Image (tube, coloured by chain):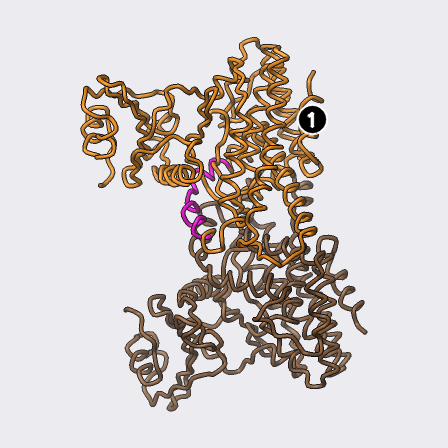
Chain colours: A brown, B orange
Amino acid sequence: MSYKILTSDIIVDYLLKIESIKEYLEEGKIEVDEIGDGNLNFVYIVRNTTNQKSLIVKQAVPYLRIAGEGFPLSRKRMNYEIRALDFYEKLLPNFVPKIYYADEAMSLVVMENLSTHIIMRKGLISRTVYSNFSEHISTFLANSLFYSSSLYLDSTQKRKLIDRFNSNTELCKLTEDFVFTLPFMEDETNDINPDLLVEAQQLFKENEFKKNVLKLKYIFMTQTDALLHGDLHTGSIMINDDETYVIDPEFAFVGAFGFDIGALIANMINSYISHFYRSEDEVYQAWILETIREIYMQFEVKFLELWSQYPNSALLKEGFIAQKELDEFKAEFMKNIFRQSVGFAGCKMARRVFGIAGVEDIRGIEDKQKLKEAELMALRVGKDLILNYESMKNIDDLVGSILSHKR
Amino acid sequence: MSYKILTSDIIVDYLLKIESIKEYLEEGKIEVDEIGDGNLNFVYIVRNTTNQKSLIVKQAVPYLRIAGEGFPLSRKRMNYEIRALDFYEKLLPNFVPKIYYADEAMSLVVMENLSTHIIMRKGLISRTVYSNFSEHISTFLANSLFYSSSLYLDSTQKRKLIDRFNSNTELCKLTEDFVFTLPFMEDETNDINPDLLVEAQQLFKENEFKKNVLKLKYIFMTQTDALLHGDLHTGSIMINDDETYVIDPEFAFVGAFGFDIGALIANMINSYISHFYRSEDEVYQAWILETIREIYMQFEVKFLELWSQYPNSALLKEGFIAQKELDEFKAEFMKNIFRQSVGFAGCKMARRVFGIAGVEDIRGIEDKQKLKEAELMALRVGKDLILNYESMKNIDDLVGSILSHKR
């Protein structure tokens, strides 16, 4: 059907006309509540109060929800979210919410209500240990990246995948602007802590580091390795002790291997910095660092394990090259993914300091002195990763960088 | 209109119903001749014998023309040729034939008959000096690559450009197979000089060099720098003393900066080798080497000159970075284009030796001993470029490599 915005008064009638949804909710009294925390979209919980079954309904509007109709943003972003969720659900059904209904024309998706999970960022802030997280997310990363790459797909499949995501221009542009450009120069969108005005001014003049930001931005814009979530921070993860779900892939596109990994690591480092200054909980800090190490090491093992199963792909033809040299090629390939991940992690960290989008982990620190120190550490680590991503050898180098910037 | 194959008996009637063609040819007796040298497509000359005005008509059929209906190949390849010609005609009208009519549904293009130009490969074989060639082709390369890149386009324009060419899968796959894979391993499509069976066997076991071929193949498959012609050898150039025209861009896609440059250089080197063994004309050999140097150096100057005119693009925002570091970034960027070009040139040379598609410059050498020596030199140079592309610094290194492999 053609597009219309589902306001609270018409949403229930609309949903109950959809067979799969009616079947899931069953008979009873249906209530609907808007969840206020969607920045881009309208998000509702629809609940049958008779049997307590519930669903999440997410609809994109042709503007930025949080900013209003004066800030147009194509609702087609939902197409890419629907397509990415579809890809993930088929490949990794235990890592994304179950999709009950999706309609690109309506910019609408109806999915499982993850009622026993919380947004991981909130869990990290309240110092919850997720002992299975590194295992889960490394599986998600290795599988989603490998199976959408030219190391698995054939040439035709790969180009078809690119076709499905190539036009997600507006959201890619948001990343180009707000991750790789504006947070590192004078711009009205920046949100600078008044206590760090001098440091911001100084950063804006550091051109050596900006040279590497340009290199990474260029890789972001022109490298088509694999399907990316595109915004894989800890606010895009719903989690509990047993399960890890990835949500909100509206930034999805076919891009550089290291971008999702870098985004995730950056957000884990921000959490570490937050606890170093705020909670001073050393056990929790150690868990975060160990988790970062495990995520990367397990990602690498799992990715290489998948790769070893497929001797034929767009890139490889069985018999083309001897095993020894193939292994060397793979080792160099993985090193390149690692370096990219480090560089992207640096951009993702540094952009959070003075840019429009801070993270609650750090900006939520109430003590002004500690907030300032945490922001400065995030900036030091981010800059270090950006300046040195090309020479970092392994995840221990990255952890070493984090530790070296504690004051 | 829907697709039908234009056989000789219906082609004139068909064409004269098209206003722009009728207008160009004017009244008179119209004759049509098939030109036999199209490998992929049917090509006709349509001539008004009254006023001698003529046109070239090119139509793709849903198979490989030279091989017949048993070798299906999507006629959609003509869409990409039409789109690339359109891009080039708007940007560089003096470097492509004038297009009188194009119809994607009919897989048909009608264009200027370049009757005073010859295929450059033939001109090179007969030792014609084209003193304006380096000036012309460096302009073509610098402009076509720069204006289709993220250094000029904005993000939206760039993604729209990718959209128009992304599905040229079949022809990209031909390159993946016949430039980067099959000529370097046992394969029934290869065409090996019986005098070089031992050398072929040996090459197929050289895994260090294949590791670099894989790296270059991966760049070819996943890097979206700019719109490429995709098959820019000296057989895709029509030339005379004054003018240089690029034709046949059916392999066009958005790919790596260095690929067209590499293809062109490889074919110039093959011509050099041909004359080193066949004509032994040292003056002509020196002209070829100097032309290779000039092409690359002028490309670089022109590309940087264009870049300097556009401080804003998908990549750059004016004021983001100081001039000194921007210049350093550009210098490193250009070095990377050079290295890529060298690597691709190596693949393009090496694949011609044992692969399905030899070049007339070398395979046309009648003296068996000289043929063998020329093929071996092409192989040495190709391998050298592939093995060392990452450490070559400038075009003199490349010319040095060529000279060092003379025997």
The N terminus of chain B, quarter of image: top left
Residue B115 appears left or right of B159 = left
Res B296 quadrant in image: top right
Magenta stretch: give its range: B159-175
Looking at this view, name the residue that lies furthest to the front.
B309
The C terminus of chain B, quarter of image: top right
User: Residue A225 in magenta?
Assistant: no
What residue is at 60 percent from the left and 19 percent from the top? B287
Q: Position of residue B317 (x, y in %)?
A: 57, 57
Q: Position of residue A386 (x, y in %)?
A: 70, 59
What residue is at 49 percent from the left and 17 percent from the top? B123
Magenta part mainly helix, strand or loop? helix
User: Residue B168 in magenta?
Assistant: yes
Q: Is residue B185 visible?
A: no
- Between residues B294 and A161, which one lies in front from this camera angle? B294
In the rendered image, the vertical position of residue A281 relative to residue B221, given as above or below: below
